[in-house]
Amino acid sequence: MPEKLVFEHTFEGLFVRGLAGRVTPVLRDRLREVGLDLDHKLRPAYDFDIWCSAVRVAAHVLHSDVAPEEGYALLGERMVDGYRETTMGRALFSVIQLLGPRRGVGRARQMFRSGNNYTEARIEDVSSTEVDLWMNEAGPIRYFTQGALRAGLRATGAVQPLVTVVGFTSSDVTYRCTWRNGVS
């Protein structure tokens, strides 16, 4: 199996744009210790383990006041908000805004694959405003992805999006994604 990589614009979306003004000297030093040096130009891609370590460090430093799972999810939302400001993100989100929630979730694999080389996803309809989404996310990163999915649903126009982890193994996770259509 090829090395799992996370691309530069994903790091930019979270650590440069999503966390703009929130990267303290302590966080900057801790990130450098795990292989992410924000004082230098970002590399084209980083090993998945560096991504996981950098997200873990940021969640711990910035969200130590909440449960770890929620800290990861909050970072996932910040990453989507920041990613929307990147060149790649602007292009991607201009398309998913037109798709709506169901079709947007259906494109999860393509959206995540724009930021890494490993994401696999399958979707199963539960109702017209509810789907189960299986992804090959492992460990605490599953909660980061939960937050990213929640923010992504909001970007599609979903009203009251909710993403719940309904099951996982050591190598994958299933999310239940629900929303309301229309205006809140």
Image (cartoon, rainbow, N blue to C red):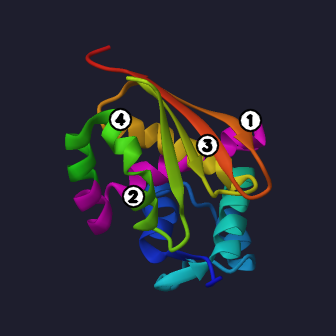
Q: Main secondary structure of the magenta part?
A: helix
Element carrying mark 2? helix
User: Dot 2 corresponds to which residue?
Assistant: 111
Q: Between tags 3 and 1, which lies in front?
A: 3
Instruction: Please state the horizontal and vertical placement of residue 179, each as a whole percent of the image.
Output: 42, 24
Which-is-in-front pick, marks 1 and 4? 4
- In space, the residues marked 2 and 3 are separated at their CA atoms by 18 Å
Q: Nearer the viewer, residue 27 or 108?
A: 108
- Give whichever of 41, 109 is nearer the camera: 109
Classify 154 as above or below 104.
above
Q: CA distance from mark 3 to mark 1?
A: 11 Å
Q: Mark 3: few, some, or many residues within 10 Å (few <14, many ≥20)?
A: many
- Residue 73: percent from the left, percent from the top? 61, 43
Please state if 95 lies on the left or on the right of 176 as rendered: left
Whether residue 86 is visible here, answered yes or no, is: no
| x 35%, y 28%: residue | 158
Q: Check the image and report above or below for 16 versus 147.
A: below
Is residue 12 located in the magenta-colored stretch of the structure? no
Residue identifier under label 3:
73
Instruction: Say what amino acid the circle numbered 1 marks.
Output: Val
The quarter of the picture where the N terminus appears is bottom right
Q: Which residue is mark 4?
A: 102
Q: Is residue 150 above or below residue 16?
A: above
